[in-house]
Image (cartoon, rainbow, N blue to C red):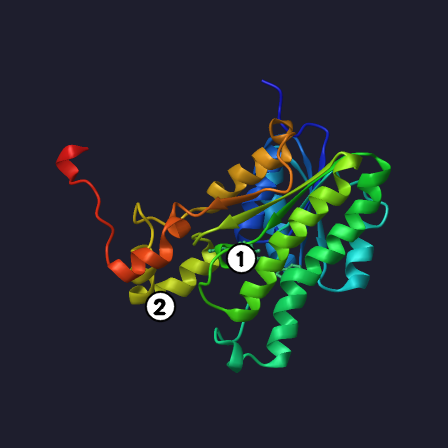
Amino acid sequence: MALRLEGKSALVTGAGNGIGREIARRFAAEGAGVISVDLDAAGNARTAELIREAGGRCETLQGDVSAAADVQRVFHARRVDILVNNAAAWRGDGLLHQVSEEDWDYVLAGTLKSVYLCTRAALAGMMAQRGGVIVNISSVNGIAGVHLAAYTAAKGGVISLTRLLALQYGRYGIRVNAICPGTIMTESSRRHYDTRPEQEAELRALYPAGEFGTPADIAGCALYLASQEARFVNGATFVVDGGMTAGYRIASLLGPMETPPEEEA
Ligand SMILES: NC(=O)c1ccc[n+]([C@@H]2O[C@H](COP(=O)([O-])OP(=O)(O)OC[C@H]3O[C@@H](n4cnc5c(N)ncnc54)[C@H](O)[C@@H]3O)[C@@H](O)[C@H]2O)c1
């Protein structure tokens, strides 16, 4: 069977860890030449090592995708057929009246400005080659009030921008879609929850199957969106959250969801 991304060049931001690394690995396994961009040089090197061990191609670039000069350097003279805007930043308080201006600027820069800078840089080449795919990694925070005010605003912005870009650049053969992951167990989220078992149990109870997602769940969706199979999918937001947001607010008001007893299964 033909590889789904054969001959394509795919740039993945934040590919030095977590979801981005898994997307990079999956794309490389489908024949793409991957450009892994990350602040974390060691993480980048590990991603490249994993891809090369599996027989794939990977170039690594260390850089901050919220800094215009770094983005310019990263995209300079590189063909990019597929851009995955995956890197993001989060920190500070959840309640808006407690969010410092410094934290707001930091989160908006890392999560939304980075998407603007990388997309702007990629679009020039994609318009000239009359084709390209952009996959923006948003979050369930972008579609539902969960927590983290600045991050929520930025992730909502990513979804709105995705829709507009689909309309503005569709006639150049460029597709732009977003993915909203629910809780995904990456190495860094594992470290976070290992010290907070009660928080993990409460969160897990919001998931209909009682399970969090894995980076592979998001990589599979990103691969579909990047491939020709999704040629008619543009401006869409794919929620990949195991059903968590399907009735999130109501479920939390009414208590545990009524489900069929095991013997009926
Ligand atoms: N893990 C989850 O539960 C979850 C849920 C919803 C959405 N997301 C989204 O998925 C994406 C990936 O998250 P993750 O959980 O894999 O995170 P992670 O912390 O495991 O990896 C993020 C990577 O991005 C890099 N990065 C961050 N800011 C950068 C910048 N300015 N320039 C270059 N590299 C930068 C980091 O160095 C790191 O390697 C993010 O957009 C995040 O908001 C994650």
Left or right for 169, reference 212: right
Mark 1 surroundings: few (<14), some (14-19) or many (≥20) residues within 10 A: many
Q: Could you say which disc has been placed on residue 142 in the image?
A: 1
Quadrant housing the N terminus = top right
Q: Which quadrant of the figure has residue 43?
A: bottom right
Pinpoint residue 156: horizontal percent, then vertical percent: 58, 58
Q: Earlier in the sequence, mark 1 or mark 2?
A: 1
Pinpoint residue 90: horizontal percent, then vertical percent: 55, 67
Residue type at mark 1: give it.
Gly
Q: Which quadrant of the figure has residue 55?
A: top right
- Residue at 74% in and 51% down: 119
Q: Could you say which disc has been placed on residue 165 in the image?
A: none
Question: Marks 1 and 2, Cα distance to the nearest angstrom?
Answer: 26 Å
Pinpoint residue 132: horizontal percent, then vertical percent: 74, 37
- Residue at 52% in and 50% down: 180
Pinpoint residue 222: horizontal percent, then vertical percent: 57, 40
- Residue at 77% in and 57% down: 71
